[in-house]
Amino acid sequence: MKIETQVRAAIRDAVNRASRKPFYWGGLKGYQQLEDVAESLRQTEGVLAENEFFQRLVLQVDRTLVQNKALAAELEQAHTWLRKVAACLRYPQSSYSEAERQNLNSQQVAYDMENLLEQFRQESEKKSILSKFHHALSKRWKDYGPELLHCYDIPGLPQHNLKLEGFFNRLRCNQRRISGRRSTKELRDFGQFQALFMVDSQDDLLEQIRCVPIEEYKKCRQRLEDSESPRRFIHQLHREPKKTISRLLGRYVERQRELESISQPTNPPPLPVYNV
């Protein structure tokens, strides 16, 4: 039952998957993840043929893939154009040589971007997702484009503020860990402080650790492992969906074979024959 629950969780995660990262779109990655789930289910179709749950599951997954195939294809085209925009903006900087960055200026980037938007407009006609994406991209380029071009004329000016956001994110995580509270509004007043708990010596630290009973520690450790199991499964599913589902179904097949071998009656030993 646990394996069936994990399979349902994998499908539910693929359908409801969301992401804020523009180069890692949740809808497209979710569709590809669902394709890997369906392929793994089909590979074990002969073994799972007698299971009504997996039979209905395969039909529902296949129907969902067919209904959203055209939508996913268009979304993949939009994602390809998004990468073209990134290449036009020479992002990230590490993917280009130092000589190319030195010879680049804001006028060249603006010219390349205008040409790319015109090509995008021609291809996005009569396509819902591409046309919406082109409209949003053109609007933002018109409103914020000139402000994005300063990094090509001012040496040392970064293209983004991700490092600064990452720094404040680490502060927020430390604040939650220290205070135990979910809200991090206090960072606006005390973000420049860090609280560290230390001991005078290693012996003192060892003495504090020994105060915790080993059995109680094992129970808490097992409870932590159980609570982390769903998150770890979803993490593995995002990284290697096909391999994760195949391994899960393999465990199910092995368990099914074990139950069948247990349920099969064994031949009783022959009765002894006595001569009268």
Image (cartoon, helix red, strand yellow):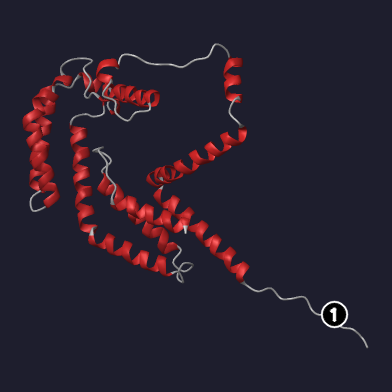
Q: Report x, y in % for residue 153.
A: 15, 17
Q: Does residue 96 appear to the left or right of 199 in the view shown? A: left
Q: Report x, y in % for residue 95.
A: 29, 29
Report the quarter where the C terminus lies.
bottom right
Residue labelled with disc 1: 272
Q: Report x, y in % for residue 83.
A: 22, 38
Res. 32 visible in picture: no
Residue drawn 6% across and 30% down?
Answer: 143
Res. 89 visible in picture: yes
Q: Does residue 54 appear to the left or right of 110 in the view shown? A: right
Q: Is residue 231 placed above or below 263 in the rendered structure?
A: above
Q: Does residue 23 appear to the left or right of 198 in the view shown? A: left
The residue lying toward the viewer, choosing from 263 and 28, is 263
Q: Is residue 209 placed above or below 130 in the rendered structure?
A: above
The residue lying toward the viewer, choosing from 109 and 239, is 239
Residue drawn 34% across and 14% down?
Answer: 193
- Give the residue at the far right of this rendering: 276
- Give the residue at the far top of this rendering: 200
The residue lying toward the viewer, choosing from 174 and 62, is 174
What amino acid type should be assigned to the residue bearing mark 1?
Pro
Residue drawn 42% across and 58% down?
Answer: 40
Quadrant in the picture for residue 115:
top left
Q: Is residue 199 placed above or below 185 in the rendered structure?
A: above
Q: Report x, y in % for residue 12.
A: 33, 53
Quadrant in the picture for residue 87:
top left
